[in-house]
Amino acid sequence: MKNLSIIGSTGSIGTQALGVADYFDDIRITGLSAHSNTKLLSEQIRKYKPAKACIMDESKYAELKALVSDTDTRIFCGMEGLLEIAAQDESDMLLTSVVGNVGLLPTVEAIKNHKKILLANKETLVTAGELIIPLSREYNVDILPVDSEHSAIFQSLRGNSCKNIKKILLTASGGPFYGKTKDELSNVKKEDALKHPNWSMGSKITIDSATLMNKGLEVIEAKWLFDVDIDDVTVLVHRQSIVHSAVQFCDNSVIAQLGAPDMKLPISYAINYPDRAECAALTELDLFSCGDLSFAQPDRENFPCLDIAVNSSKKGGLAPTVMNAANEIAVEMFLKDKISFNEIPQLVLSAVDGLDTKDSLTIDNIVKYDALAREYTRNLI
Ligand code: NDP
Ligand code: MG
């Protein structure tokens, strides 16, 4: 039996993971969490009967408790509650599918409690990869990527050593605004940004995909997961989202993973690893009907977030924490119509350039600078 807890179970990845779990008799759901969606979380509690559940928004705690008072699930709230889910004895793996750097502390807690990590929450590796990867080695815990590109790289690497990687070829759809100039981007609306051509995802990552920040975060995620130099991660725009990423080895051989653009496949792969499981929920790829496959350079000039992210990683230390927190606030403000699309990179850059990040990289300092950068960015608006 696999005992799976999910933080962020009401989101795009969380609900798809539960949908995948429905197909397997050997998966038991042991913990669930949401930010504020009490309705869906209470329905999930009734269906999956987890030992524990957490609502992050403490003002919703009483409401959730009342909704599920006739069940045996113990209800928690806030960060303390998330840490309960991460550490709970009933589970042996944790899917981190919350959005944003809020995933950091639960991930650390789960590793320290020897839970296998199924990692969707890329922000955690962006800010703390330098600490999380050694910690996972110290506790002998697997970190299995759920992000489709990193799952593809992970699958392409099976039977090979990271030492033989020449380059990682990280594919990007290009997002809804591919081909647009800065001028054209100045007037785009959030409704247009939320229309991703190939993937249906939560709103934050959808905006990150439109700015190419998502690809910047993924370059950093790849650097930590696969122990490569950041300059050895090459981004290719691949509009069809069929080749989910590839590895070029030292002998120039390229191994890629292909599939339909459907997150259920990397989710199922991570849950069932090291096996592969047949599952009716997984979309079949028909190569005869997917047309031509194309690869192009990303547009780094009109979409500066890609380089802003990469450069923050080169700066190192707490710079990616500031970059990530500023981006989280900028995206939130764009979604509230408070800033324009082109102001997203401007704000992130102002925070990275404006905040001194000389302190040492520790989990405590990441939490501290995450809060500082949020405050700093809010004050810029
Ligand atoms: P969603 O916005 O759809 O879901 C986020 C989940 O986290 C929800 O359950 C939400 O609860 C909860 N949540 C939001 N804010 C907080 C908070 N401050 N504290 C605690 N819980 C919170 O996001 P996605 O599922 O799209 O993405 C989740 C993560 O996976 C992100 O890091 C993203 O980058 C990554 N990812 C997503 C992909 C996708 O296809 N969606 C693909 C690859 C990676 P509530 O419902 O109550 O708001
Ligand atoms: Mg991805």
Image: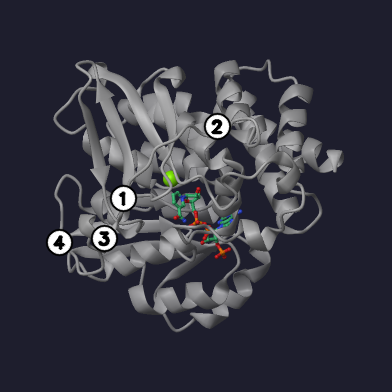
Question: Which of marks 4 and 2 precedes in the sequence?
Answer: 2
Nearer-N-terminus badge (3/4): 4
Q: Is residue 81 left or right of residue 346?
A: left
Q: Which residue is mark 4?
A: 278
Q: What is the CA distance from the residue labelled 4 to the residue labelled 1? A: 20 Å
Residue identifier under label 1: 93
Q: Position of residue 355 (x, y in %)?
A: 76, 24
Of residue 12 and residue 215, the one placed in the foreground of this image is 215
Q: Give me the residue at 48% from left, 76% from top.
A: 42
| Residue 246 position (above or below residue 252) | below
For the C terminus, the quadrant is top right
**Place of residue 116 in the rendered image (x, y in percent of width and height, measured from the top left):** 30, 44
Mark 3 or 2: in front is 3
Decide if residue 201 is in sight here: yes
Q: Nearer the viewer, mark 1 or mark 3?
A: 3
Q: CA distance from mark 1 to mark 3?
A: 37 Å
